[in-house]
Image (cartoon, rainbow, N blue to C red):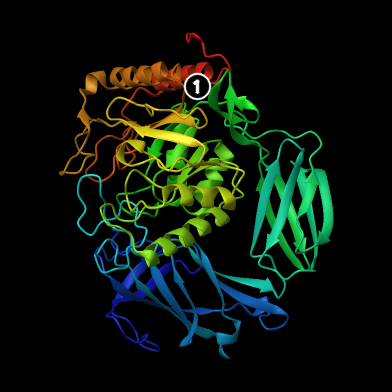
Amino acid sequence: NLNGSWQFAAAEEGEKPPVGKDLKEKILVPYPVESQLSGIERHEDRMWYRRTFTVPENWRIGDGKRLNLNFGAVDWQSEVYVNGRKVTEHKGGYDKFTADVTEALKPGRTQELIVGVYDPTDADNGANPPVGKQRLDPSGIWYTPSSGIWQTVWLEPVAADHADSLKITPDVANKQVTVETRGVRDGVPVTATAYEGKKKVAELSGRTGKPLKLKITDPRLWSPDDPFLYDLRVRVGSDRVTGYFGMRSIAVEKVNGTPRTILNGKPVFLMATLDQGFWPDGLHTAPSDEALAYDLKMHKEMGFNSVRKHIKVEPDRWFYWADKLGLLVWQDMPSMEAGRTPDTAARAQYEREMKQMIDEHASSPSIVMWVTFNEGWGQYDIGRVAEQAKAWDPTRLVNNMSGLNLGADGGTGDIMDEHGYPSPAIPPRPDGRRALVAGEYGGLGLAVPGHAWSVQQSYVDVDPATYTDDYIAKLGEVRSLVCKGNNGAVYTQITDVEGELNGLLTYDRKVVKPDVKRVKAAHEALIRDASQPTVPGCTTS
């Protein structure tokens, strides 16, 4: 693990990497350069990171083994040098990348690693990268940027033939799971073994280049009520990979003439919060794994069965916790800047980053929906982009635009999604094919003294004495829309963020605003009733 203290310096366009030169500042990786935890706490468009490392002798690099250098995420464009040799470059602020650095190693113990980063955020310089909520001038619903290395950096010894990832696809209808090894040449012997606890339930061997289809005779289905995960072990030549999978299906089907979201063959109402994944001390990077898990655990404690990850992509550990705890994830593609029309290059980059997001997280059972655009932000070719996402991953739902009220509907995807504040709303003109959801609503604002930023924004202010009552009243409005075909709702939001006060938790996560037991009971009752084939209290025509 190469997290920790690195040397740091601001950079200018066209500068050569500072090979062999000490940099004057220190930064704590993997916290964004603007964050308090980084130790820098300012924005730089261009920057250098530098450190040295040693390769353990018992890894025997060069003796049939290679050395990979892995980055969880760097925002936004990066160049990587080992001992002055450029080993890779990458564009994309939310996806991982790897460099084989074996040939760049030099004799002796100490190796030099330099990373150059360029992140214009929302500066109008033609780049227009996917930025989500980041802004150089944050205020209101826009937040402080998260530039530079913001996820873990690590070294890994690997066999010459090795899997760099697995794509695991459950097929509940046929009681099987497909395992594909990626990043390895065709023809290498491969064996996949599935376990239910310590019990082996399936095993199959073959050769890379052709997926393995393991029969799961009596599958235990993954759901929010029972988030059961099978263990998986894969041998690829001399390489060993461990992982897990969940057996679950998701679809939109008509039930009594109404398009419904269907989990494992049964209707399910998706009750979520808007989860933006910002932290007061680490911005995009949670201060610890316990902190990363905490927000998701609070979702479960308050009775939510879903979470909308709003225009940010989290590290793998976040998805692990969602998989393990049992939450249905709506995963947004981080949007380009609102109000700017993306050019051809920006559109191509947007779609490259979207494909990376889908490919990297395709094996998480928790993800049930890809959201390709949010409202009118950086939006283009809505119908085509949704169809492309569906082609990349036909096993999940596609929401072509969360917030139909702010743009023309592309007519594609599986979901029609309306935003309403503070009261929930559903699309007024359903097409009879796609399932309806209230993709954002609520925004009840409550400032907790000592736990709120000085600049404050909310959709509606609430009296502390009536906060829980007001929240449950809005939930009653969600319930009334179920009879009109509503399949899900996303409350804004799980935590306060910077100047926004509409969180169920304060930004520092030290205060939970509502009565948790009452809210949980209300959510569970709504999910139970709204997930019935015939919803109680609704009349059919």
Residue 214, image x, y percentages: 79, 47
Q: Nearer the viewer, residue 155 or 167?
A: 167
Q: Is residue 495 left or right of residue 383?
A: left
Is residue 155 placed above or below 34 in the rendered structure?
Answer: below
Q: Is residue 248 left or right of residue 507?
A: right
- Residue neighbourhood size for the residue with mark 1, other residues' Cα within 10 Å, grouped as few (<14), some (14–19), many (≥20): many
Is residue 131 placed above or below 98 in the rendered structure?
Answer: above
Label 1 residue SS: helix
* Residue topped by disc 1: 527
Name which residue lies at 41% across and 52% down. Answer: 381
Residue 428, image x, y percentages: 37, 26
Q: Nearer the viewer, residue 220 or 23?
A: 220
Name which residue lies at 58% across and 42% down. Answer: 396
Image quadrant of residue 404?
Answer: top left
Q: Is residue 193 left or right of residue 54?
A: right
Is residue 359 placed above or below 475 in the rendered structure?
Answer: below
Give the amino acid type for the residue marked by disc 1 in the picture: Ile
Residue 264, image x, y percentages: 65, 31
Name which residue lies at 27% across and 27% down. Answer: 422
Name which residue lies at 53% across and 52% down. Answer: 388
Q: Residue furthest left?
A: 454
